[in-house]
Image (cartoon, grey):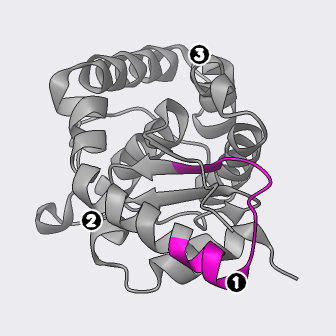
């Protein structure tokens, strides 16, 4: 049996935007020693049941990306998905949401954004690929499709990381220090 694993690691626009929004929300509730990137002194309001809505949006977005990763940028451009479901609906909040959206987009398209996030794990990515490929060969499993790993710049604290069939969303921190990462990734192959 030969290695047939195809694995793609890319930093999702949409899931990272959700982490960005999550961090803005959490920064309002934490003291400044616990603030996360980005710190934006915002006066905009979030929906009262933000955390529940966030989990719902996260699950929907992760499912859509796992079904067709090429749609990530299209989903990111669905501003109403984020604004209408996560932010209080008023003119001032719409303006603040647009500022958050543009702030993320400028950062993400710069060398300090998506490129830096993806580059931060390039060496570890090869190690992970080798370990997963060896595990598949050892178990006699032939992958049915490409394994997609969506890399997050920070931990998602308000929703569960999604590990589904051939898809995983993993933070840089977990990528670099998580000892059970291979077990979690190999679980995406749903062995019988």
Give yes or no for residue 57 being in the magenta stretch. Answer: no
Task: Give me the residue at 64% from left, 54% from top.
Answer: 4
Q: Residue furthest left?
A: 33
Residue range (magenta): 134-149
Disc 1 is placed on an element classified as helix
Q: Is residue 36 visible?
A: no
Q: Residue furthest right?
A: 192
Number of residues whose C-alpha sits closer than 10 Å to that of mark 1, classed few (under 14), some (14–19) or many (20 or more)? few
69 vs 95, left or right, is: right
Task: Give me the residue at 46% from left, 23% from top.
Answer: 97
Q: Tell me where residue 31 appears, x and y as whole percent.
A: 18, 66
Number of residues whose C-alpha sits closer than 10 Å to that of mark 2, classed few (under 14), some (14–19) or many (20 or more)? few
Residue hosting label 3: 77
**Mark 3 or mark 1: which is in front?**
1
In the figure, 165 relative to 137: above or below? Answer: above
Number of residues whose C-alpha sits closer than 10 Å to that of mark 3, classed few (under 14), some (14–19) or many (20 or more)? few
153 vs 158, left or right, is: left
Q: Tell me where residue 96 appears, x and y as whole percent.
A: 40, 21
Q: Splitting the image into 4 quarters, where does residue 14 fall?
A: top right
53 vs 174, left or right, is: right
Q: Which of 78 and 179 lies nearest the eye of the viewer?
A: 179
Instruction: State how far apart marks 2 and 1 are (Cα).
Output: 46 Å
Residue hosting label 2: 30
Q: Splitting the image into 4 quarters, where does residue 118 fall?
A: top left
In the figure, 190 relative to 159: above or below? Answer: below
Q: Tell me where residue 155 appears, x and y as whole percent.
A: 39, 62
């Amino acid at each position: 049996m030969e290695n047939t694993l195809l694995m793609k690691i890319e930093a999702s626009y949409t899931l990272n935007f959700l982490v960005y929004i999550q961090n803005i929300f959490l920064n309002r509730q934490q003291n400044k020693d616990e603030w996360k990137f980005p710190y934006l002194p915002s006066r905009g309001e979030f929906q009262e049941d933000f955390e529940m809505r966030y989990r719902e949006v996260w699950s929907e977005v992760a499912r859509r990306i796992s079904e067709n990763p090429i749609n990530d940028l299209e989903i990111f451009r669905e501003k109403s998905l984020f604004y209408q479901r996560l932010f209080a609906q008023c003119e001032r909040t719409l303006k603040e949401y647009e500022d958050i959206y543009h702030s993320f987009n400028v950062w993400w398209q710069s060398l300090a954004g998506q490129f830096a996030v993806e580059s931060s794990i390039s060496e570890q990515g090869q190690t992970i690929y080798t370990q997963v490929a060896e595990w598949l060969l050892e178990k006699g499993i032939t992958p049915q499709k490409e394994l997609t790993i969506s890399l997050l710049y920070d931990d998602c604290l308000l929703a569960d990381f999604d590990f589904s069939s051939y898809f995983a969303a993993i933070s840089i921190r977990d990528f670099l220090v998580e000892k059970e990462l291979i077990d979690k990734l190999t679980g995406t192959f749903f062995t019988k």
